[in-house]
């Protein structure tokens, strides 16, 4: 019994410390994509946590991605060929967003609130997915609605360069 | 934003100070909606029964379609589908889309086909949204297949699902729903064109006909939106409100209440074409262009909520409306 408890503790610790080891990256990635999404108009937003629609990536990559001379072509955007191994094992590490973590976001120019998933607030409602993550690559989905005919969803592709996360490209998943 | 403190006049007519947009020179840059129509100040469809599905000009008109060849191949044609959710629960809208919207590819052709003679190969499927179901959420969402490609035969493969919010199908005026359908179809067109241009750029020898000249000729001063990363929602809404507003209004006219004065009809259609600008960087510039954003807000609200009575708004003062009598809007179709 003690051995089982010990194993359980080790597993739990691995997950917990595995994620906390990347907490700084995790926060930087979210802050980068929020800033990128609303770069023209910093504003008050309400955030809720969702799950990345990984099917879109899988379907595009497995079925239709086209190899190019110097890269790959996924969903009509071009990525450096070094993304290939990452996309192949994109399920390997997911980081999940919690309400506690959202409440700790601090982005200059933004006022950020947290919302439960099924509630709709006045103003701009932002959905952030979990992150598909490796040491220097990340994929995250951001969606927002701001009115009856206002909103869009994007899957962002990010790379870490000089200790900073940068948006390399994005894929439009829906638009309103 | 202009603040109104008294009840504004929503009766339309010549006194409308932010203007209406007569269809000078036909339907604008994208070709004619229906060959032989002369819009002028007279809606050629005025004689139609408003309770029946509306057709452009007459029921004999058909959009230009590629000659059907044997064996039939779906990629050679533009198609419009209606999902079971829409067909079973909202048969009126389903019928409107499948029977009356001029096959929708006619709409698309009026936007893009005629001037250059290239087909869209646009495959649209309309259904009820499973994500947007309540008031306050989006009225609709367009979800494209994220990979668009051109096959060795030169056919573009592009499938789009357009999900409509059931709440607004039940509660918004029919005109608002039609405006939403046109709005989302325009998104589909922009996404397609952007992707086709990316394919042209990234292939050698080039695939397709959507090249830099095409983009510059069709998208005017906004061509840069189409040549960089995927155009954002905000950029697409600016395109709709400026570069494509004439076509938007032309298409909407066909379905508007035939007894509406032309000024009210065109003003309403124009504001619905501009409503989505609200979150774009252009919204705050509109007053300096002589466009009253309060009027856009209020009239959109009237169309969206089918308002009857007097209302107060925090930023735009009070207004009185009976959406059917004042603006000649049509009750919900569901």
Image (tube, grey):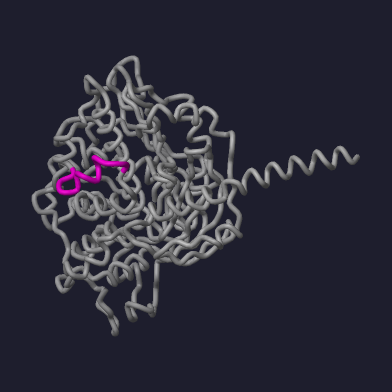
Asked which quadrant contains residue B146, the reply is top left
Where's the N terminus of chain A, which quadrant?
A: top right
Q: Position of residue B81 (x, y in %)?
A: 41, 36
The segment highlighted magenta reads B219-230
Residue B291: image quadrant is: bottom left
For image coordinates 41% across by 60% down, the residue present is: A146
Depth check: B302 or B37 in front? B302
Which of the two residues, B117 or B41, is positioned nearer the viewer here?
Answer: B117
Furthest-top residue in this view: B71
> In front here: B164 or B94?
B164
**Could you tell whether B206 is left or right of B164 in the image?**
left
Residue under the image location 57 percent in, 50 percent down: A23
Residue A68 is one of the magenta-drawn residues: no
Residue in the image at 58% along x and 51% along y: A97
Q: Is residue A49 above or below residue B188?
A: below
Q: Is residue A71 found left or right of B28 in the rendered image?
A: right
Comparing B174 with B24, the one in front is: B24
Q: Is residue B229 magenta?
A: yes
Vertical comparison of A85 with B22: above or below: above
Instruction: Say which residue appears at 17% left-offset and 41% top-offset.
Output: B218
Task: Give the total of numbered labels.
Answer: 0
Residue B94 picture quarter: top left
Residue A153 is situated, as x and y percent measured from the top left of the image, at: 43, 47
Q: Image height check: is B64 above or below A9? A: above
Q: Main secondary structure of the magenta part?
A: helix
The percent position of residue A99, horizontal first and vertical second, equals 60, 58
- Determine if residue B162 is in view: no
Direction left: furthest residue: B25
Q: Position of residue B100 (x, y in %)?
A: 33, 44
């Amino acid at each position: 019994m003690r051995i089982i408890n010990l194993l359980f503790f080790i597993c739990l610790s691995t997950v917990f410390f595995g994620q906390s080891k990347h907490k700084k990256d995790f926060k930087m990635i979210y802050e980068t994509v929020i800033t990128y999404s609303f770069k023209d108009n910093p504003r008050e937003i309400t955030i809720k946590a969702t799950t990345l629609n990984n099917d879109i990536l899988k379907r595009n990559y497995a079925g239709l991605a086209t190899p190019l001379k110097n890269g790959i072509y996924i969903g009509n955007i071009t990525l450096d060929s070094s993304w290939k191994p990452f996309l192949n094992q994109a399920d390997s590490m997911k980081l999940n967003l919690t309400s506690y973590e959202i409440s700790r976001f601090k982005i200059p120019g933004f006022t950020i609130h947290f919302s439960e998933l099924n509630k709709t607030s006045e103003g701009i409602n932002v959905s952030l997915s979990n992150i598909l993550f490796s040491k220097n690559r990340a994929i995250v989905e951001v969606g927002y609605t701001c009115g009856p005919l206002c909103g869009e969803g994007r899957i962002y592709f990010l790379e870490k360069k000089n200790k900073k996360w940068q948006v390399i490209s994005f894929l439009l998943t829906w638009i309103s | 934003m202009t603040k109104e403190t008294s009840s504004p006049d929503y009766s339309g007519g010549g006194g409308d100070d932010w203007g209406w947009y007569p269809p000078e020179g036909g339907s604008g840059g994208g070709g004619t909606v229906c060959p032989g129509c002369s819009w002028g100040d007279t809606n050629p469809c005025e004689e139609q029964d408003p309770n029946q599905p509306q057709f452009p000009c007459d029921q004999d008109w058909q959009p230009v379609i590629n000659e059907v060849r044997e064996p039939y191949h779906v990629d050679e044609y533009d198609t419009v589908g209606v999902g079971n959710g829409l067909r079973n629960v909202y048969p009126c809208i389903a019928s409107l889309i499948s029977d009356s919207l001029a096959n929708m590819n006619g709409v698309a052709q009026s936007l893009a086909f005629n001037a250059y003679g290239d087909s869209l190969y646009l495959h649209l499927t309309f259904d009820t949204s499973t994500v947007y179901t309540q008031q306050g959420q989006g009225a609709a969402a367009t979800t494209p297949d994220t990979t668009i490609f051109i096959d060795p035969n030169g056919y573009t493969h592009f499938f789009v699902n357009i999900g409509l919010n059931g709440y607004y199908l039940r509660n918004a005026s029919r005109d608002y729903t039609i405006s939403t359908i046109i709005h989302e179809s325009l998104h589909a067109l922009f996404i397609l064109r952007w992707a086709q241009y990316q394919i042209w750029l990234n292939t050698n020898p080039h695939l397709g006909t959507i090249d830099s000249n095409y983009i510059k000729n069709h998208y005017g001063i906004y061509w840069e939106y189409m040549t960089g990363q995927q155009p954002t929602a905000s950029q697409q809404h600016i395109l709709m409100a400026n570069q494509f507003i004439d076509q938007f209004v032309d298409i909407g006219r066909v379905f508007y209440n035939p007894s509406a004065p032309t000024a009210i009809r065109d003003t309403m259609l124009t504001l619905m074409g501009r409503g989505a600008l609200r979150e774009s960087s252009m919204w705050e510039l509109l007053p300096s262009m002589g466009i009253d954003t309060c009027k856009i807000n209020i009239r959109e609200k009237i169309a969206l909520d089918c308002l009857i009575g007097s209302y107060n708004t925090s930023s735009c003062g009070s207004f009185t409306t009976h959406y059917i009598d004042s603006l000649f809007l049509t009750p919900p179709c569901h």
